[in-house]
Amino acid sequence: MAADLHDNPDAMNPTKLEQPPYWFCPETGIYSSKFTSVQLPLDPFLDAVSAIFSHRHDGDVALVDSSSGFSISYAELQPLVKSMAAGLHHLMGVKQGDVVLLVLRNSVYFPVIFFSVLYLGAIVTTMNPSSSLEEIKKQVVDCNAGLAFASPDIVEKLGTLGITVIRVPESCDLGSIQIKNSKFYDIINGNFGIVPKPLIKQDDAAAIMYSSGTTGASKGVLLTHGNLIAAMELFVRFGASQYEYSSSSCVYLAVLPMCHIYGLSLFAVGLLSLGSTIVVMRKFDIAEVVRVIERFKITHFPVVPPMLVALTKRAQGVCGKSFKSLKQVFSGAAPLSWKFIEDFIQTFPSVDLIQGYGMTESTAVGSRGFNTQKFKKYSSVGLLAPNMQAKVADWSSGSFLPPGSQGELWIRGPGIMKGYLNNPEATQMVIIEDSWLRTGDIAYFDQDGYLFIIDRIKEIIKYKGFQISPADLEAVLVSHPGILDAAVTAFSVSHEECGEIPVAFVVRRPETTVSEQDVINYVGAQVAPYKKVRKVFMVNSIPKSPSGKILRRELRRILSNSVPSKL
């Protein structure tokens, strides 16, 4: 039987309000958070590390390695950070303003390294270990990194960078022979005493996080200590405060990469101020995830959509035997299709599923789902975080729109980046008057203040003057019982009156024989005539980023190589 979702799965048909609610101002077009504002620290000389360790809690174990069981307690964490900061300063010469590169898989030492660099007033920049050498070289030059920490299998690849590379052993116990005979051990356990801490301002740079580049060239997002404090207080700590259970009793599974803003803001910043336990996995493997959830009694599992889908498939039919500890799954970084939501809810009826919205440029602060007895809006990314404001702008006229109307989402608040590194032109394009960040996302607020993300403006298909959202058609496609996955993109045609047409890429379920015409007919029966899919390609998989975002540029590349200009 279908779950009672208390939700409208058709996010394309919002209802406009006759009377504006208290959280929307028609005169200014500003949406305000429905939550009471949070008092952020006013001291301009407060750094992120001091802010994190200033919070008192009764947490015991901070970080646990999922493979070995090695752990770092909260009592050990701050002394370890100070010891490593001293080692970095005395052995490696790291000082305020220096940039340190982390090319690391998830590790219990990731937060320790991160904090120790920030403790010195230096700046962290991160990269995914799967990045190519050319990508790494480009980032090193762009942000002028002078030192790198890397996972063991990455060290040799980085030998041509011209900077010192420190190998971070996968063996976690500092007493092991492997670590004792390493430069890393000399730095973290060198007994150099306490290094004098420089004067660090909230407005000083703390991290340079590079945007994904899925819709353009990758850019360095300059985040300050104040931005990280905002992420801790508004994204993590406030979210945790909405629940009755104690944060120190929660056990989080860290599979999301800490090199990404989503994982960084949770596992290397916010949760460590709450006293929660973080079980760290080096990479995602669904069989191992199930084992770890059971072994460590995981209560909270932040995911991206591909992880949620894999967990759902693995759990179907065995929920009564496993996952009893699991309380909440939080999905972010990319939209969840309604089919994936419905499958999860039916498989995990007692697990709280929420989505959230944030950007690298907002330090992951934006909105967060919150299910209540009255509202269970699973397809929404939730309510605006405290201290955050938003506008919805008509992307043609620039006018600001009321609840129920779709337009480009603008957001403003203490998480917004300082700007793009060495790129004032790009900064001026996205951060406009009065510090509004133009997100490039099409969104709307419903009558209850819940935010729905529809698509990217750059992905909108323009057909005969009509505007078509690929996500709209993708939701229809994956509802077909014979379709496993699907993606839609635009194809420019020679007919001037058309401009662009929607083209679908479809992954069939193995046991089905759905034809291209079947797909075209199925979609055509459920959408307006101008939205109809005009061409279908059967493929083995949909190209996606690790976070689950459809790589439409790859779809367009396939199209340009295989389709004539006339269809």
Image (cartoon, grey):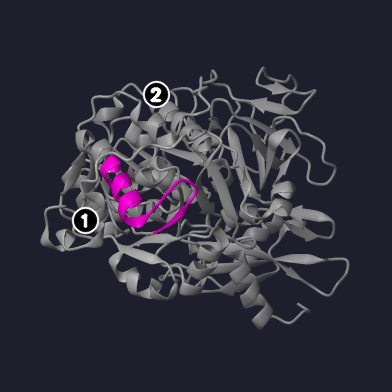
Whole-number angstrom distance, CA of label 1 to CA of label 2? 37 Å
Q: Nearer the viewer, residue 44 or 361?
A: 44
* Residue matched to label 2: 241
The quadrant in which the N terminus is found is top left
Residue 100: say if magenta: yes
| Residue 168 point in image, percent of width and height | 28, 60
* Left or right of residue 560: residue 2: left
* Residue type highlighted by circle 2: Ser
The quadrant in which the C terminus is found is bottom right
* Residue type highlighted by circle 1: Tyr
Residue 351: say if magenta: no
Residue at position x 65%, y 36% from top?
Answer: 411
In the image as oriented, which residue stretches furthest toward the right?
A: 496
Q: Residues within 10 Å of mark 2 (few under 14, many from 20)?
A: few
Q: Nearer the viewer, residue 116 or 63?
A: 116
| Residue 85 point in image, percent of width and height | 32, 45
Residue at position x 61%, y 27% from top?
Answer: 449
* Residue matched to label 1: 185
Q: Quadrant of residue 487?
A: bottom right
| Residue 443 point in image, percent of width and height | 66, 41
Q: Nearer the viewer, residue 152 or 262?
A: 152
Disc 2 element: helix
